[in-house]
Image (cartoon, helix red, strand yellow):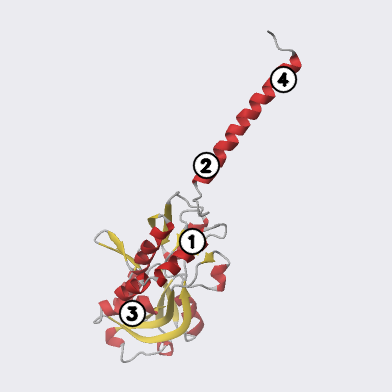
Amino acid sequence: MRLRPYRFIAVIIVVLLGVTSACSSSKSSESKAATSADGQRLITPGTLTICADFASPPFAFEENGKLIGFEAGLVEAMAPSMNLATNWIDTPFDSGFSALDAGKCDVIVSGLTITEDRKKLANFTDAYFDADQSLVVRAKDASATKNLADFAGKAIGAQAGTTGQAFVEKNKAATTSIKLFPGDDAMFAALGAGEINAIVQDFPFSHYRASKNPTEFAVVQRYPTGEQYGMAVAKSTTGLLDQLNTALAAVEADGTYNEIYNQWFGATN
């Protein structure tokens, strides 16, 4: 039986509505696939993708092909209670926020001090580590150099984009020059080679490096700054921040945090 024109048009509309509904359903499924039951919107469903600088002992560094360190252990301890696997992405410290903004990771965990300027770029978890700044020199120079004022006319190194850079810029002598480095290894190599005369860096990093190389480096000053580290997530993220805070509180409450802390720092901080 041939359909009348108006009935034929009605059939076409019904078919088109069905196709539109199917496409909408498909997009909805894709959206839900990226969001867990807890409201975590993740790059990879079921996996927490973490940006971290792998050259940052004792917080995150590679040894025998395995990522270890305080922050590495802390996040791995938190992940099970979030029902998440982990995927670590090696990211230079000064590239962390751009990587987060570009959607390359869900969270930055990289010895990141919580500051008002950084709060404009990302949301931070509760603080999980207290830190100060420090002055590091070659071990042979330890008795002669104790303060930033001793480096007038000399060069001090700092890692680019860190609160160490901000501290030395604010407190150095007028004639002291600053040389910036992308990471710890290059910075300490330059100090050892005499290319710079000192380093200003977060105390837990410098203390660890000096304790492992006592004949090469010495921490001669610790500056109380009241800094605290937090994990950073994108401003657009919903659910994940609360889940990270809940998981962090859980490992602190059950003693796991203290076990990991003592493994890497003992009573040094």
Name the front one of labels 4 and 1: 1
- Of the two numbered discs 4 and 2 on the same chain, state the one appearing first in sequence: 4
Identify which amino acid the numbered label 4 is placed on: Ile
Mark 3 is surrounded, within 10 Å at the Cα level, by few (under 14), some (14 to 19) or many (20 or more) other residues, namely: many
Evaluate whether residue 264 shows in this view.
Answer: yes
Which residue is depicted at the point 56% across and 71% down? Answer: 117
- Disc 4 versus disc 3: distance between alpha carbons? 78 Å
Q: Is 115 or 260 nearer to us in this picture?
A: 260
- Of the two numbered discs 1 and 3 on the same chain, state the one appearing first in sequence: 3
For this view, does 205 lie left or right of residue 1? left
- Disc 1 versus disc 3: distance between alpha carbons? 32 Å
SS class of the residue under badge 1? helix
| Pointers 2 and 3 in contact (C-beta within 8 Å) | no
Name the front one of labels 4 and 3: 4
Which residue is depicted at the point 57% across and 60% down? Answer: 235
| Pointers 4 and 2 in contact (C-beta within 8 Å) | no
- Of the two numbered discs 2 and 3 on the same chain, state the one appearing first in sequence: 2
Mark 2 = which residue? 30
Mark 1 = which residue? 243
User: Dividing the image into 4 quarters, which one contains the C terminus?
Assistant: bottom left
- Disc 4 versus disc 1: distance between alpha carbons? 51 Å
Q: Position of residue 152 (x, y in %)?
A: 43, 87
Mark 3 = which residue? 207
Tell which residue pokes out farthest to the top in this image: 1
Mark 4 = which residue? 9
Q: Position of residue 126 (x, y in %)?
A: 49, 70
Which residue is depicted at the point 56% across and 41% down? Answer: 28
Name the front one of labels 1 and 3: 1
SS class of the residue under badge 2? helix
